[in-house]
Amino acid sequence: MKHLVLGRCVTLLLLLLLAFQGAAAAAAEPGLLLSRAIAMGNGPAVESFVAQYPVDLNLPLPLHNGLSLRPLSIALTRIQANTQRQLLPHVEREGYLPEYETQMLERLLRLDADPVYQEDRLQAKTPLHLALDLPEKQQLDVLRLLLQFKAEGNLSLQDQQGLTPAAYAAQKQVAAAQWLSNYKASGLSDFNIRHAPFVYARGQKALERFAREEALIAAAFDQDLPAFQSALEALKQAAESPDVYLLEPVGRPLLHQVALNGSAEILTQLHRAGVRISITDFDGRQVMHFLAAQGRPNQIHHLTALAPVTLNARDREGNTPLFYALRAGQADNVTALIKGGANPALRNYAGLSPRELLQQELPNHPGLAGCFSLLESQSN
């Protein structure tokens, strides 16, 4: 009898533990899941979310970078879908490719997102302004779509620089500026057809994956190592590996954010989980570039031990982390980079050398004076 009672107690404890873990997974912030689904270009996940939760698509959604943006703004400022296709192999394996901006925007607009507003967190830009920040080949298609959904109310609105969409376009794209200046709403048809949302099985699957990834991101931002390890284990149990980018609309990999938060152990855990230290953002910058621009010599030492090749990584303009340290006046970082093995003779693509940059920056950062001898000794 005693063994029977003990066995039942153990079974009950296991059931409670499983229930607790399930509740914890379900406790992810719903708004973060929706913003993530939009940023990842996963339309079925967006419609699955709208079908399950009461949500106003005209209210800001939280993002991990501290911003809260309206859903349309997230769709307009997220990383370009064609770039995401190259960066998210796990999405391709699931047979789903991210939607282009026009597809995601139309989905949100048909779910009653209002395109007439100004985004205070983005210099008071309207969706028409934000559309003009897209690649030129996409601008007219997105502008047409927004105007079909009655976005002409934005034509007279000014951003923080006092520019209407047409005036903003004049600085960037003459054809779009002329088109906006001459635009007349026809009023012949109502394109804002409301489609009832449908629950897609693949959308639900994506939401569940996003919840696991959100747990990983939250633990990384909180520098909570046990929670981070638990989130990694949850991904492993679901036969998933951590997305190497864990994309935010601003396009900075989670790896970079973790490094900037100063969590060396979590950075190491990501590295062990298979995340490449050399991944870049969309300006070609690696983790070491960001660390070099801040007072982080200890993190530079740590990252050098994990991946010494990052010391001489180049961004899109050919600048190595040494250039970032010099421009930021971080003398300790310059020392850490040079002693770690950074090459002070590497010029950027404009032909500028670190020593020439040091001469330019010295008036602004007198503390760099001691770096001349260090650069020269290592260059010889």
Image (spheres, rainbow, N blue to C red):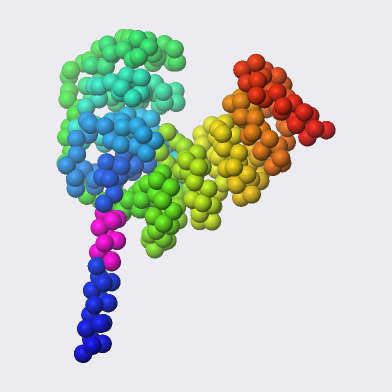
- Is residue 86 in view? no
Instruction: Measuring from the top left, give residue 314's x and y in whole percent.
Output: 63, 34
Question: Which of 200 and 352 lies nearest the eye of the viewer?
Answer: 352
Q: Residue at x 26, y 87 (%)?
A: 3
Q: Quadrant of the N terminus?
A: bottom left
Residue 241: image quadrant is: bottom left
217 left or right of 362 in image: left
As drawn, the residue found furthest toward the bottom would be 1
- Whether 151 is drawn above or below 58: the answer is above
Q: Residue at x 59, y 42 (%)?
A: 298
Predominant secondary structure, magenta span: helix
Q: Is residue 319 left or right of residue 80?
A: right
Q: State which quadrant residue 150 falls in.
A: top left
Can residue 151 be seen here? yes
Which of the pair 108/176 is nearer the observer?
A: 108
Instruction: Return the residue found at the far right.
Output: 380
Q: Residue at x 71, y 37 (%)?
A: 338
| Magenta residue span | 17-26
User: Of 145 and 369, which appears nearest the observer?
Assistant: 369
Which quadrant is the C terminus positioned in?
Answer: top right
On whether residue 82 falls in the magenta region, the answer is no
Residue 319 x %, y %: 63, 30
Query: Residue 321: image x %, image y %?
Result: 63, 34
Percent x, y for residue 9?
24, 77
Can residue 18 be found in the magenta stretch? yes
Count how many numbered circles sit on residues in the image: 0
